Image: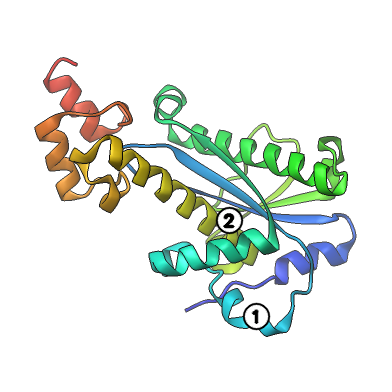
Amino acid sequence: MEKPTFDLEKKFLKEGRYDFIAGIDEAGRGPLAGPVVACVAVLRSLPFQKGESDMWDLIRDSKTLSEKQREKAFDFIQENFYIGIGLCDHKTIDRINILEASFLAMKKAVSQILRIMDQELGIKDKDDQNLMILLDGNREIPNFSHSQRAIIQGDKKVKSISAASIIAKVTRDRIMLEMHEKFPDYGFDKNKGYGTKLHVESLKEFGPCEIHRQSFAPVKSWSMEHGA
């Protein structure tokens, strides 16, 4: 299994053009219900202490971790990174589409982390030339003033992106657990809104709830069939 490193962050910092390197990732593009959540993570200091290698090894692609491992890594990341979180709900996803909603959530996350870093370090939004954003995937964020670099499979290669992927995943999972309490018929505690067989069967039986994404095929098909 490929392990992410801080090599790219160190490379950009060594060049001297940027003071901070951020990783950004999102969770929740594929589900039929709930929000898309983005996270941006900036390591507080390089290098990190050597005696914590086991915990740092947990910071990798969130999909390779168990739920218990992600929860454990979540707290460690919160202690060692500046964190910004942004989300777009199901209504926004339906209005502007999931890709644009993902980008908007990322922009919100960056705005939040700049506010946090301003409070702690005096980093202003106008100082965006000091910040480089590394994002997972092959597309950069459109209409975005900050320096950025898209990294294919970045969550598997770049430690800061891995950290962001874990925070985004855990944050969204917690939201869906809360939604399960409100809408227990769909198994959100198990499927987190993804279109599992049981979820689709529940959708057919009960119809969509208020957090389902009306623009997504299974939900849209039900609405068309029932004239909703």
Residue 121: percent from left, percent from top: 86, 49
189 over 106 or under it: above or below: below
Q: For the residue labelled by badge 1, is the local secondary structure a helix, a strand or a loop?
A: helix
* Residue at numbered disc 1: 52
111 over 92 or under it: above or below: below
Q: Looking at the image, which residue is at 54% across and 45% down?
A: 38
Total tally of numbered discs in the picture:
2
Q: Which residue is outermost to the left? A: 205
Residue 179: percent from left, percent from top: 33, 39
Q: Is residue 48 left or right of residue 25?
A: right
Q: Which residue is outermost to the top? A: 227
* Residue at numbered disc 2: 164
Q: Looking at the image, which residue is at 58% across and 56% down?
A: 164
Local packing at callout 2 (Cα closer than 10 Å; few below 14, some 14-19, many 20+) is many
Q: Nearer the viewer, residue 108 or 146?
A: 108
Of the residues shown, which amino acid type is indicated by label 1?
A: Glu
Q: Is residue 157 left or right of residue 29?
A: right
Tag 1 or tag 2, which sits nearer the N-term?
1
User: Whole-Å distance between the Cαs marked 2 and 1?
Assistant: 19 Å
